[in-house]
Amino acid sequence: MTQYVIEPPAVTAVPVAGGGLFPVRRVFCVGRNYAEHTREMGGDPDREEPFFFMKPADALVINGADIPYPVKTADFHHEMELVVAIGTGGRDIPEAEALAHVFGYAAGLDMTRRDLQGQAKKAGRPWDMGKGFDQSGPVGEIAPASKIGHPAAGKIELVVNGAPRQSSDLAKQIWNVQETISYLSGLVELKAGDLIFTGTPEGVAAVVSGDTLEGEIAGVGTVRTRIV
């Protein structure tokens, strides 16, 4: 029997509404999936092919835990997003079959060291240290699709210290969930346990220590964290 030479890392798992845990394998994120956010980031809102980046599974923040203001940044931003939990994997999944691969949905935050991301963009380098750093992915409970269906529209919003920051509708996504799953599965074989953060609407902005972030997606759930 093979013995590990170090202690294996713990499995990251997200609570499921109604009971149970969803073990996370990989975390994919869609860039610029709302036209108004694309404009505010200086991009072209015309519909182009989607692009993706990743966060480590252990960057997720569970159960409303506090997160520290991260090191090496002076411009720490929130991005409120719908998160898709993949329950059945596949490769080259047709759009018409994509939703059958979804276990459920959650509300999440793609926290970003915007200054590091901007420096990487300017230098033509990867975004990893701007996006995939420790505790950069707060996520709420996963609501099973068997109970809530597949939300194609509905309010997505974030308030910071009780004041509105982001407010939009899932219907404004450039690439909807089935299109995103189909396209991504043509690049990699999706597996059960994968999460997909589906992009943020306009209104991204900086947060500081002491701020409380509370997000909600209609019919899906909430996400909450505090910067300490």
Image: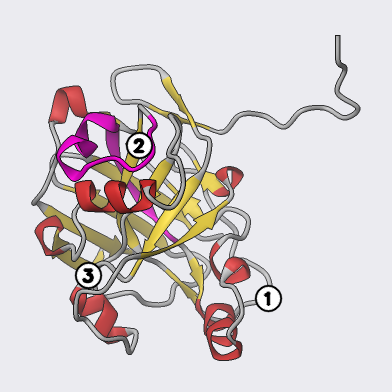
Residue drawn 22% across and 49% down? 177
Residues in magenta, as a range: 89-110
Q: Which residue is denoted by mark 1 in the rendering?
A: 72
Q: Is residue 134 left or right of residue 117?
A: right
Marks 2/3 in contact by CB < 8 Å: the verdict is: no
Name the spot of residue 26 as percent of width and height, x first. 52, 42
Residue 45 image point, x, y percent? 21, 81
Q: Secondary structure beneath disc 2?
A: strand
Q: In terms of secondary structure, where does tag 1 sit?
A: loop
**142 or 96, which is in the foreground?**
96
Q: CA distance from mark 3 to mark 1?
A: 28 Å
- Could you tell me which residue is drawn at 60 percent across and 66 percent down? 128
- Please name the amino acid that badge 1 sits on: Lys
Q: Which residue is mark 3?
A: 34
Mark 1–mark 2 Cα distance, whole angstroms, equals 31 Å
Above-or-below relation of 4 to 140: above
Q: Which quarter of the figure is the C terminus placed in? A: bottom right
Mark 2 vs mark 3: which is more N-terminal? Answer: 3
Q: Which residue is mark 2?
A: 85
Q: Residues within 10 Å of mark 3 (few under 14, many from 20)?
A: many
